[in-house]
Amino acid sequence: MTSETHRREGREAIARLAPAWVSPLAWLAVVVGAIAFAVGVRAADPAPAWRALLVNFLFWVSLAQGALIWSVIFRITRTSWSAPINRMGHAVLWFLPFCLLAFAGIIVGRGYLLPWLGHDMGDRAVWLNARGLFARDGIGLVVLVVLSWAFVRGYLRDDSLVGGHANGDMPAPQDDGRTAGGHPPRKGLGEIPALQERERRVNRRLSVLGVALLFVYMVVFSLLGFDLVMSLTPAWHSALFGWYFALGGLYLGMAWLVIVAVVVRKTGTGNAFPFALPAGSAGRDEEEAPISASVTEGECAASPRPVKERIGTTELRNLGNLMLAFAMLMTYFLYSQALPIWYENLPPETGWVILRVHHQPWQALSWVLIFTCYLGVFALLVVREMKEKPATLMAVALLVLASMWLERYMLVVPSLAPKAEAHSGTPLLAVLVGVGFLGVLVLTTTRFLARYPATSELDLALRMEREKWE
């Protein structure tokens, strides 16, 4: 097969996942972001460009790694409803190396980002020194990316070994009950004695790797919160902030999974993300089709079920409930930090808060955050209908992304440019650089899903096993 044929098939696979204009628009976004950053760095005052890079690195690396960690959590907990969602979490894998490149850029611009550089930090110099900071954060990020790669690649490898149809190419059944390849119709892994031991080994391997990946994620992202956010105000410290920052990544990751699920549900066609179509469900309204209906062995060899019929009310409601839970958790962590700062009334701690809640323009933005990122999402998602309709759930997920981007902005910029005139060029540059990051994420995600479009055989096995006992 020639390289031109490969390219054509790749374009056709991407076209089945998203409209034709998505890829050119994503490339345009990458170009706009790159030009904006290059112009900003070469300006008379390059500090706004480096601040924009830091804000967007903290936002997009949290989103991407958080989305992948959700697929890890779903695997560890062996959820059956998340079968069509897990591959979407895997799809951010190819974006993670770009995040490492952005981190390297932060190292280059450290002189504009770390206000304590060149100052005597006393006893705190043991922790607040550039070499140690970037060494531990860089090593942590590389380990996290390597473990993420191992988890996803192991998923794909074990998928093909166990299921035999990892790419979603399910042969049509013949008259004698055997598929076109001469194999019997696919069964649940637990129903084939020869595969039972292999299934246990695969599940054990992925569970162990997933637990390690989840642990490393919490450690590394807590360090990022301490080193790249809290250290911007060296006098301020909070033992809870690292956890808050890491949980924010899971909040972002869930919002991104909701957006990808709704988009693919609407635009995905053909055999993208195939799944067996239960007998009798053809022709029903897609909102009423039973998502968790019982699937028999013979039906598993039936024609692939389009993704728009598999991501239905049950899946959307579950995703919405998880996003609601993390909105509540983020609000709780915010309150848990604000309360001791208020009643202790220590100047090193209150200064960080006073700047953001009593001085403009930060005061207005803080109120916007409270009523969007925290209380607003809770008020919207507590309504059941908001979680069951794709359009409304996607709107809330977009609100989460926008408000969490503002939250990352508020964590970084007031510490580096507390006066309004000092950050005048930062908002526009931050938005344009963020558009570039988004373009890279869209390009890498669509290409990953085009290459690995099938719902995992391992996840389908969990789903079939659960339905067998229901």
Image: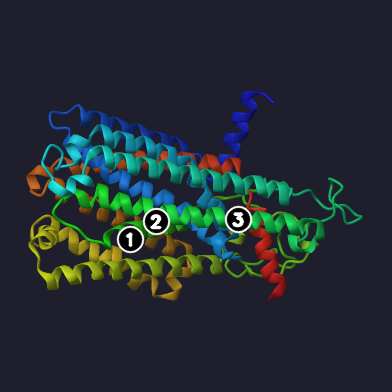
Q: Are the residues flagged by discs 2 and 1 in contact, CB closer than 8 Å?
A: yes
Q: What mark, if any, has residue 243 been given in the picture?
A: 1
Q: Three-letter amino acid code at disc 3? A: Val
Q: Residue at x 21, y 30 (%)?
A: 41
What percent of the width, then of the height, locates residue 133?
A: 27, 42
Upstream in sequence: badge 2 or badge 3: 2
Q: What mark, if any, has residue 307 been given in the picture?
A: 3
Whether 308 is drawn above or below 56: the answer is: below
Whether 433 is drawn above or below 460: the answer is: above
| Quarter the C terminus occupies | bottom right
Judge from the rendering whether residue 61 lies leftward or rightward of residue 206; answer left or right.
left
Upstream in sequence: badge 2 or badge 1: 2
Q: CA distance from mark 1 to mark 3?
A: 35 Å
Judge from the rendering whether residue 270 lies leftward or rightward of residue 173; answer left or right.
left
Q: Three-letter amino acid code at disc 2? A: Met
Upstream in sequence: badge 1 or badge 3: 1
**What residue would you read off at disc 2?**
218
